[in-house]
Amino acid sequence: MHSIAVHGGAGTLARADLTPENDRAYRAGLERALRAGHTLLAEGGSAVNAVVTAVRVLEDDPLFNAGRGAVLAANGQHELDASLMDGRDLRAGAVTGVRHVRSPIELARLVMDRSPHVMLAGAGAEEFALEQGLTPVPNAHFATERRRRELDRMLQGQGESGREPLMGTVGAVARDGEGNLAAATSTGGMTGKKWGRVGDSPIIGAGTYAANDCCAVSATGHGEYFIRVAVAHEIASLMRYRGLGVEAAAEEVVMRQLVKLGGSGGVIAIGHDGRIAMPFNSEGMLRGAMDSSGRLETGLLRD
Ligand code: ASP
């Protein structure tokens, strides 16, 4: 049995903003990503290829805060973060603060496959992208009217970085037919973030983690809290050392540990048994799941 889950961010969409049109558009975007990853799994593809494929679909969709459509930092620039982990052997790749890489998750994959490192930052990451033959894009490639308005509102004091609904992120977790797990996450971070700020998304163990013996996790939410709780790895630890199932472990971290600190957001997680958990403590989390039994579901807010 193979399965995949994706998210398009927590706190991206307030209930008040949910019109029938954007309900359809967000669900269609999530479903495109699920189908792209699922098709690959159904053809015998690996979990790691499936999560990268699904995240790339979401990076290219301007509705979501990753790649095109990413939010703006306080200096008016897009600074993108991404990470990826292969549960087979715990190999991982991550990039942070990139400005000219069309698909940050593709670059994270190259860091994993073709460098001796796990994480590359800023100018060094851009240089590595050029060495690997990626064509740079101008920073304006990621720009949308909506994100410019959101930043302007925030700079005028009508919003606070980290408060809903100014976050977002995309991610995917998968289990392939051979039982291998993988997780991938990509983001523009938080609107109005300080130049150089790094959130949880590119940090292995915080925003992304995968290990075949327990689970694959991709997180979304107020990154500072997710780093402090080491969210993705904490879920894995609860499964490993306390023997919890993936639902109970994810629930404990998202609904208890994060809430205790005041950190809003959620995760998608797949257990080694293929079970999927998608808890969130925010008003909503754009999310979806699909598996070989025919399950296909998407959700936006708390039902
Ligand atoms: N976790 C991301 C960050 O802090 C933002 C998000 O998921 O909404 O950069």
Image (tube, helix red, strand yellow):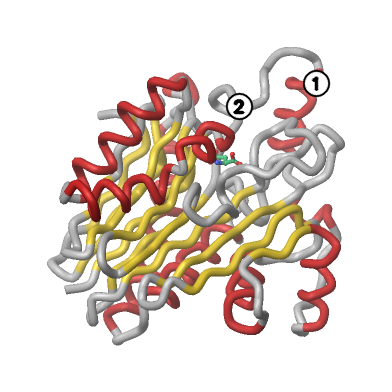
Q: Amino acid at mark 2?
A: Gly
The answer to whether residue 287 is left or right of residue 205 is left
Quickly name the residue at label 2. Answer: 162
SS label for mark 1: helix
Q: Residue at coordinates 83% horizontally, 53% vertically from top-left?
A: 140
Which residue occupies the foreground of this view, 225 or 16? 225
Residue 125 percent across, percent down from the top left: 77, 67
Res. 75 in view = yes
Residue situated furthest left in the rendering: 293
Picture quarter with the C terminus:
top left
Residue labelled 2 has its Cβ within 8 Å of some atom of ligand 1: yes
The answer to whether residue 246 is left or right of residue 68 is left
Looking at the rendered structure, which numbered label has been put on residue 155?
A: 1
Label 2, label 1: how many angstroms apart (C-alpha)? 13 Å
Q: Amino acid at mark 1?
A: Leu
When asked about the image quadrant of residue 149, the answer is: top right
Residue 120 percent across, percent down from the top left: 72, 64
Whether residue 244 is situated above or below residue 139 in the rendered picture: above
SS label for mark 2: loop
Crowd tier of the residue under label 1, counting other residues whose Cα lies within 10 Å: few below 14, some 14–19, many 20 or above = some
Residue 205 percent across, percent down from the top left: 47, 53
Residue 54 percent across, percent down from the top left: 45, 65
Which residue occupies the foreground of this view, 259 or 5? 259
The answer to whether residue 244 is left or right of residue 22 is left
When asked about the image quadrant of residue 110, the answer is: bottom right
